[in-house]
């Protein structure tokens, strides 16, 4: 093979790997804080991408309605849980966060969708819509199960994934969509050609990872998330609600998912079910990182991206198989290195 | 002296096994109350239930309010603090972050002053403020656990076996700090196997055996009681060094 092809493949691999890194980091975060293995992460990707593409094409995305429906559900759960000690402030606060907010966003989407808003507005709206879906989803599907085992949470996670994928088909249809590039244009450096979109992917990934690092290291809420991940009982004894940490984790995961989708959809056509495979590759990276290590996950994601790029060049029929086969030696090594651990009971 | 914590006819069970039976106790403001008893008597279970970690049958009231419907986080916000036996620190975070998180439920503006107070009480923590909690010695971890609980400005601090596994000199230090807390207006409910040391600083004491209180009274009277002396104080020296 010649060097040019190799450089192309590496470049392609890094672009994809950067996105897998974002998704892998979100998976590690959500698992550490809530013990949920977030299979619907892929749907956040699809929803973000297709909401963005629909808006840019002047269509009304169904996700805005879903956000309102889930918000109403979340409000009902809040009311039910507090039924014995209802007080006005709590009801009003929950109503504004869960019903008024998505209603405003829905109204905004309805009024803007027809007039093909500029790219920046499409991105902002898509991010807000998917973020709300992630937040309310946690309230409706995972918060009531917070004290159950990892297995129960995993089953709930599979259920949510299937439901969201079905809704995705309903909202966006079976045809794929492509969105406008965030940054158009391109330039060449030597043999390599950098498109504006690939530069955007690198820049946003790096910016997001730095922002996450600052968030966890310096801000109170970042520390709250770390504390909950390290010691759930200790956090509760400090007065930190695990539900608060769960909400922040899901909010971050859905924003990361949607952002990844928005970054991919100008490069590849996405279908209602494409997110699942993309999410799984983030998952492969997260598993290689042991579901605990952020740096290892990021590095593993780049490796996954590069392996994928090379295998799609040499054996494109087997590219998914080859990527997922990466897991087998890793799992073998891990099971040899670490003795079986009983699941934590709490 | 007003009553801060009152527990009436409390039962705590693990499945069908009752670990705590029909226990009643009171802690007044500015008071150190100790529960002494052998390993497995149900002391830790009782503290966990008062904090809301385990469910309890009976009545628990704090500062005049029934706690039945309140979860752990609400109880923390009301001024009830627990330093658990296993300390439950955030081991991968540094000392200062651990303390900062302890002040999660109080106003940000007060947290700074709160941290200064904790550092004044435990100068060792200030020296190690950038060190990871997991790398501290046992005594320092105990200090950090107490410091974290104090950051939330509790009215009542419950300490579960603070002397467990620590060198005698550090134990003495911790007990001295407990008396300083009382002077600063914090009540303490102290659970200890080290009965001798606990009875020396406490105002009031309960003796727990097999899930029940068998004796209660002024700490000095309990310390003078022959039966207590025979069952707990006699083995005291051996018990403390064996751990």
Image (tube, coloured by chain):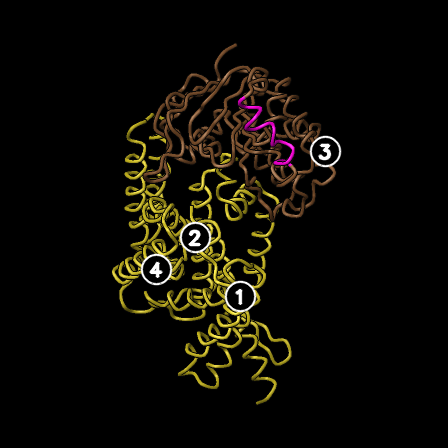
Is the same chain shared between marks 1 and 3?
no
Q: Are marks 2 and 1 on the same chain?
A: yes
Decide which of tag 1 and tag 4 comes sooner along the chain: 1
**A88 and B64: which is toward the camera:** B64
Which residue does the image show at 39% across and 62% down from the upper left?
A42
Which numbered mark, 1 or 3, is in the foreground of this view?
3
In the rendered image, is residue B96 in sight? no
- Which range is magenta? B227-240
- Same chain for marks 4 and 3? no
Location of the C terminus of chain B by quadrant is top right
Q: Chain of mark 2?
A: A
Within 10 Å of the Cα at label 3, are there few (<14), some (14-19), or many (20+) other Cα atoms? Answer: few
Q: Which residue is mark 3?
A: B169
Q: Are marks 2 and 3 on the same chain?
A: no
Front residue (pair A145, A301): A145
Task: Find residue B107 and report its horizontal and vertical position in percent.
Answer: 55, 28
The correct choice, above or below, for B91 with respect to A23 in the image is above
Count residues near mark 1 (Cα–Cα under 10 Å), then give few for <14, some for 14-19, many for 20+.
Answer: many
> Considering only order in the chain, which callout, 4 or 2, is on the residue closer to the N terminus?
2
Residue placed under numbered mark 1 in the picture: A18
């Amino acid at each position: 093979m010649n060097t040019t092809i190799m450089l192309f493949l590496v470049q392609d691999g890094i672009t994809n790997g950067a996105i897998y890194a974002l998704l892998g980091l979100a998976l590690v975060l959500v698992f550490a804080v809530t013990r949920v293995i977030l299979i619907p992460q892929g749907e956040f990707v699809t929803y973000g991408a297709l909401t963005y593409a629909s808006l840019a094409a002047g269509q009304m995305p169904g996700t805005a309605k879903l956000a309102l429906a889930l918000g109403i559900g979340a409000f009902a759960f809040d009311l039910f849980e507090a039924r014995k000690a209802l007080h006005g402030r709590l009801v009003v606060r929950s109503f504004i966060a869960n019903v008024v907010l998505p209603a405003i966003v829905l109204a905004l989407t309805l009024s803007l969708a027809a007039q093909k808003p500029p790219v920046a507005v499409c991105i902002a709206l898509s991010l807000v819509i998917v973020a709300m879906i992630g937040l309310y989803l946690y309230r409706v599907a995972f918060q009531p199960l917070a004290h159950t085992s990892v297995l129960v949470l995993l089953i709930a996670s599979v259920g949510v994934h299937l439901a969201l994928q079905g809704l995705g088909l309903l909202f966006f249809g079976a045809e794929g969509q492509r969105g406008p590039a965030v940054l158009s244009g391109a330039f060449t450096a030597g043999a390599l050609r950098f498109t504006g979109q690939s530069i955007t992917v690198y820049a946003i990934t790096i910016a997001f990872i730095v922002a996450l690092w600052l968030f966890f290291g310096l801000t109170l809420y970042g520390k709250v998330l770390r504390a909950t991940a390290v010691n759930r009982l200790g956090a509760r004894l400090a007065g930190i609600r695990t539900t608060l940490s769960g909400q922040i984790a899901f909010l971050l995961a859905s924003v990361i998912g949607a952002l990844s989708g928005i970054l991919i959809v100008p490069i590849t056509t996405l279908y209602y079910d494409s997110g699942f495979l993309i999410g799984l590759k983030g998952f492969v990276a997260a598993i290689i990182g042991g579901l605990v290590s952020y740096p290892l996950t990021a590095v593993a994601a780049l490796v996954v991206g590069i392996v994928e790029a090379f295998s799609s060049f040499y054996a494109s029929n087997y590219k998914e198989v080859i990527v997922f086969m990466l897991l087998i030696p890793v799992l073998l090594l891990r099971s040899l290195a670490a003795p079986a651990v009983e699941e934590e009971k709490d | 002296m007003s009553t801060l914590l009152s527990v009436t006819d409390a039962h705590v069970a693990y499945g069908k096994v009752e670990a705590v039976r029909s226990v009643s106790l009171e802690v007044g403001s500015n008071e150190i109350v100790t529960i002494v008893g052998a390993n497995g008597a149900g002391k830790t279970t009782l503290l966990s239930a008062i904090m809301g970690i385990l469910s309890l049958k009976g009545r628990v009231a704090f500062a005049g309010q029934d706690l039945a419907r309140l979860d752990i986080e609400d109880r923390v916000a009301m001024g009830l603090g627990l330093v658990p036996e296993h300390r439950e620190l955030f081991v991968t975070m540094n000392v200062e972050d651990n303390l900062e998180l302890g002040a999660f439920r109080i106003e940000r503006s007060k947290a700074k002053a709160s941290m200064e107070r904790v550092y004044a009480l435990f100068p060792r923590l200030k020296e190690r403020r950038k060190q990871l909690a997991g790398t501290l010695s046992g005594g320092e971890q105990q200090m950090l656990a107490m410091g974290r609980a104090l950051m939330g400005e509790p009215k009542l601090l419950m300490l579960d076996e603070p002397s467990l596994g620590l060198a005698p000199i550090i134990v003495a230090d911790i007990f001295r700090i407990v008396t300083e807390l009382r002077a600063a207006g914090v009540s303490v409910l102290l659970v200890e196997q080290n009965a001798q040391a606990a009875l020396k600083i406490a105002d009031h004491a309960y003796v727990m055996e097999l899930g029940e209180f068998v004796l209660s009274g002024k700490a000095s009277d309990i310390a003078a009681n022959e039966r207590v002396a025979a069952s707990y104080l006699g083995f005291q020296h051996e018990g403390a060094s064996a751990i």
